[in-house]
Amino acid sequence: MRARAQRARRWPRLLAKGAAGTLGVGLFALLVLQLWFFAHVLWWRVANPVESAFMARRLAELRARDPAARLEHRWVDYERISVHLKRAVVAAEDAKFIDHGGFDWEAIARALERNEKRGRIVAGASTVSQQLAKNLFLSPERSWIRKAQEAAITAMLEAAMSKRRILELYLNFAEWGENVFGAEAAARHHFGTAAAALTPEEAAWLAAILPDPRRHARGRTTPQASARAARILARMPSARIP
């Protein structure tokens, strides 16, 4: 009887040790993952990524149907991207880009209020830095775990990189159409010109389609995109860029 009682008392201790061990392994794995992300962020301060996680996922989807499929993408340095596109993207996606540390807390509060009123997600408040974190490393799925990881990577980007580098990376890996990634490919695909030669109107239209780029085929627009482009064009002169 005494042996049985002793065994019964041991079980909670064994379970607690097992749980602590599992938690320790989980935390160690999480730490290793964060170090992996940060190592890439540090390397990409000076080296240009070949592709983003979004590009790799999209290419895998295409090659499942056509093994010879390719994406439209060509890296172009910051200096060779039209100042109009830089201003348009900041005006459209992140007006406080220069000033914040990766998160626009006022925009987040407004988005939460709108979503609460509607009872569903109808508004977001992702900054350029947050969008870059997602594009480079993560998936498009919506979950609190993914958002937490996005926030952690955003903090890494802001700590390790200049605003100029963050915007350069963003412009080179943003999706701008069906299988079209980056400013150079977008300019050539939609307007038959180089990213450096984009006009203010062309730049405003490219910024206008960023929320849903696959809906906009070459040479085709919608009233909604045209109206948004007009609003962006009006805000571009006041947009501050690095």
Image (cartoon, grey):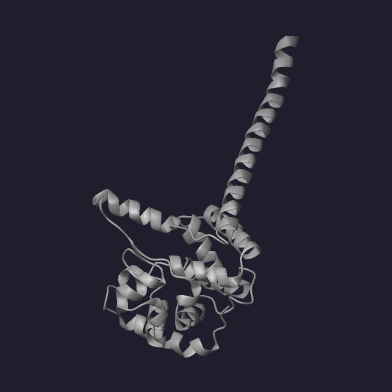
Residue at 51%, 89% (x, y): give it. Answer: 237
Give the total of numbered labels.
0
Residue at 35%, 81% (x, y): give it. Answer: 224
- Residue 237 visible: yes
On the image, the x and y values in percent for residue 51 come to 43, 57
On the image, the x and y values in percent for residue 48 come to 49, 61
Determine whether, in the image, residue 181 is placed left or right of residue 127.
left
* Quadrant in the picture for the N terminus: top right
Residue at 60%, 53% (x, y): give it. Answer: 38
Image height of 93 relative to 235, above or below: above
Determine whether, in the image, residue 28 is placed left or right of residue 71.
right
Determine whether, in the image, residue 242 is placed left or right of residue 9.
left
Residue at 41%, 83% (x, y): give it. Answer: 204
On the image, the x and y values in percent for residue 148 come to 58, 56
Q: Quadrant of residue 81?
A: bottom left
On the image, the x and y values in percent for residue 209 come to 38, 75
Image height of 51 relative to 92, above or below: above
Image height of 15 relative to 61, above or below: above
Looking at the image, which is closer to me, 188 or 156? 188
- Residue 127 visible: no
* Quadrant in the picture for the C terminus: bottom right
Looking at the image, which is closer to me, 122 or 198? 198
Looking at the image, which is closer to me, 82 or 145? 82
